[in-house]
Amino acid sequence: MFEVKTIALFVITALAEIIGCYLPYLWLKEDKSILLLIPGALSLALFAWLLSLHPDAAGRVYAAYGGVYICVALLWLWVVDGVKLTMWDGIGGAVALLGMAIIMFAPKSV
């Protein structure tokens, strides 16, 4: 159950980070309202707080989180941006998830 909770928290964290970066992007590149910076900043603050909820060492959490972030970003590319993913996107995402699983779930010596 620890693994499921960890991955779910990573996915929510990744969504908060992507949204926090996507909203300023819309303002800068798509000529949307500057008011998007407010929810963007709140989303980035949520992202930082969510990362702090993991019981493991911060460096390990950040390293492992990167693998989940890659997969969520690829899903965002497909769902939100409408870009068809390639086989290489899928392979890269799988390798990133494997790295996350090794970092977070392998036995750790005390």
Image: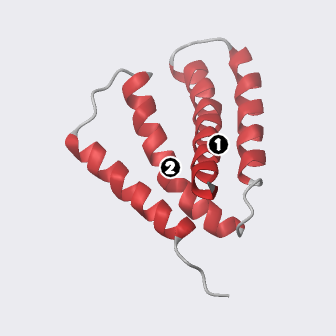
Callout 1, which amino acid? Answer: Thr
Outermost residue to the left: 87
Quadrant hosting residue 65: bottom right
Query: Which quadrant: the C terminus?
Result: bottom right
Q: Name above or below for residue 10 compared with residue 24.
A: below
Check the image and tell me how it is coloured. secondary structure
Q: Which residue is mark 1?
A: 13
Callout 2, which amino acid? Answer: Val
In percent of width and height, residue 41 lies at: 75, 32
Disc 2 + disc 1, Cβ < 8 Å: yes
Residue at horizontal 77 percent and vertical 55 percent from the top: 52
Q: Which residue is mark 2?
A: 68
Distance (Cα) linking label 2 and label 1? 9 Å
Q: Is residue 107 left or right of residue 99?
A: right
Query: Residue 89 versus residue 21: which sits nearer the camera?
Result: 89
Q: Residues within 10 Å of mark 2 (few under 14, many from 20)?
A: many
Q: Is residue 100 left or right of residue 89?
A: right
Label 1: element kind: helix
Outermost residue to the front: 1
Quadrant hosting residue 11: top right
In percent of width and height, residue 44 lies at: 71, 38
Residue at horizontal 65 percent and vertical 35 percent from the top: 16
Residue at horizontal 40 percent and vertical 30 percent from the top: 77
Query: Residue 6 versus residue 96: which sits nearer the camera?
Result: 6
Label 2: element kind: helix
In percent of width and height, residue 90 lies at: 29, 44
